[in-house]
């Protein structure tokens, strides 16, 4: 770590739990962020500011005026650009030392598997169940930690699935196929702008804890946020032995 980095990251280095060793881990890490919208924006900005060495940002949409109320990666001047190109500009402006890989595509199939395999951990900042299930499957197969977040209207949630631990439940354990609520898109139902900042920032915090190996991640716990009453609740849940993804041999989609 050079003198400029020692100054830039000095407030992390001062933390006994992190120090130079923890900050060095950030600099040498690679995070995959799927979704460059309301959640991906604050998550990516904080990971970039923290010095995570490589950020891969994947999103298949372009910046729209309706995004600007909450998606803080983007600006009015970049309306019409791919969100990942807009994100690349914002993240490299925040920290020119990091490498940002911009993928303007919806990751799925082999492409998703390849990108998950290349990363140290994955942040699911998507907005639909089909993508969340696909990411969960890929992370389980590649044994990569997954930080999941969601926000709609005034409610948010965050959880962590650590597949390096055989006892960790997966997203499918928490929300089995066919038992989840109907997809609620903010384009239809709306979303409180600061809530996406809270959830995305919490995702960044969980990701940094995992990369540094500190604290207690939200594994087996679902953090629920109610922005109207500003209350936080944590629910515990366990691995489902009958889960078709991670239960037994995890046979689904193999």
Image (spheres, rainbow, N blue to C red):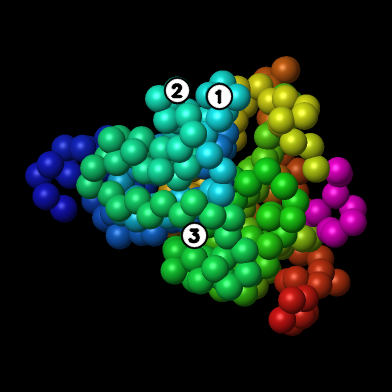
Residue ID for mark 3 = 121
In this rendering, the answer to whether 237 lies above or below 4 is below
Residue ID for mark 1 = 65
Residues 234 and 128: in front is 128
CA–CA distance between discs 2 and 1?
A: 7 Å
Residue 240 x %, y %? 81, 66
Does residue 168 show up?
Answer: no
Residues 91 and 65: in front is 65
Residue span colored magenta:
174-182
Q: Residue furthest front?
A: 80
Which numbered tag is attached to residue 76? 2
Helix, strand or loop at mark 2:
helix
Q: Earlier in the sequence, mark 1 or mark 3?
A: 1
Q: Which residue is located at x 39 percent, y 59 percent?
A: 30
Q: Residue furthest left?
A: 3
Residues 156 and 39: in front is 39
Binning the other alpha carbons within 10 Å of mark 1 as few (below 14), some (14 to 19) or many (20 upward) gives few
In this rendering, the answer to whether 21 lies above or below 111 is above
* Residue 185 figure quarter: top right
Q: Which residue is located at x 22 percent, y 47 percent?
A: 97
- Kindly check if marks 2 and 1 are in contact, taking CB atoms under 8 A apart as contact: yes
Badge nearest the viewer, 3 or 2: 2
CA–CA distance between discs 3 and 2?
A: 31 Å
Instruction: State the predominant SS element of the stretch in magenta.
Output: loop
Q: Earlier in the sequence, mark 3 or mark 2?
A: 2
In this rendering, the answer to whether 161 lies above or below 158 is below
Badge nearest the viewer, 1 or 3: 1
Q: Which residue is located at x 78 percent, y 27 percent?
A: 189
Residue 80 x %, y %? 49, 34
């Amino acid at each position: 770590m050079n003198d400029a980095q020692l100054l830039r990251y000095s407030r992390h280095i001062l933390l006994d739990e992190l120090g130079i060793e923890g900050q060095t881990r950030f600099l040498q890490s690679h995070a995959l962020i799927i979704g460059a919208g309301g959640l991906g924006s604050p998550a990516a900005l904080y990971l970039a500011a923290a010095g995570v060495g490589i950020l891969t940002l994947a999103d298949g949409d372009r910046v729209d005026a309706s995004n600007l109320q909450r998606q803080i990666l983007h600006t009015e001047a970049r309306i019409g650009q791919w969100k990942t190109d807009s994100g690349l500009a914002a993240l490299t402006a925040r920290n020119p030392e990091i490498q940002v890989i911009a993928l303007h595509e919806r990751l799925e199939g082999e492409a998703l598997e390849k990108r998950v395999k290349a990363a140290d951990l994955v942040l699911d900042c998507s907005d639909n169940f089909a993508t969340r299930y696909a990411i969960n499957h890929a992370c389980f197969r590649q044994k990569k930690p997954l930080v999941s977040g969601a926000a709609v209207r005034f409610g948010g949630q965050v959880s962590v699935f650590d597949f390096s631990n055989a006892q960790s439940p997966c997203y499918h354990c928490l929300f089995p196929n066919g038992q989840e609520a109907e997809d609620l898109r903010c384009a239809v139902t709306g979303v409180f702008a600061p809530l996406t900042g809270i959830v995305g920032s919490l995702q960044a915090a969980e990701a940094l804890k995992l990369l540094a190996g500190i604290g207690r991640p939200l594994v087996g716990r679902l953090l629920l946020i109610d922005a109207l009453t500003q209350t936080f609740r944590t629910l515990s849940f366990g691995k489902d032995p009958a889960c078709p993804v991670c239960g037994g041999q995890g046979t689904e989609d193999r």
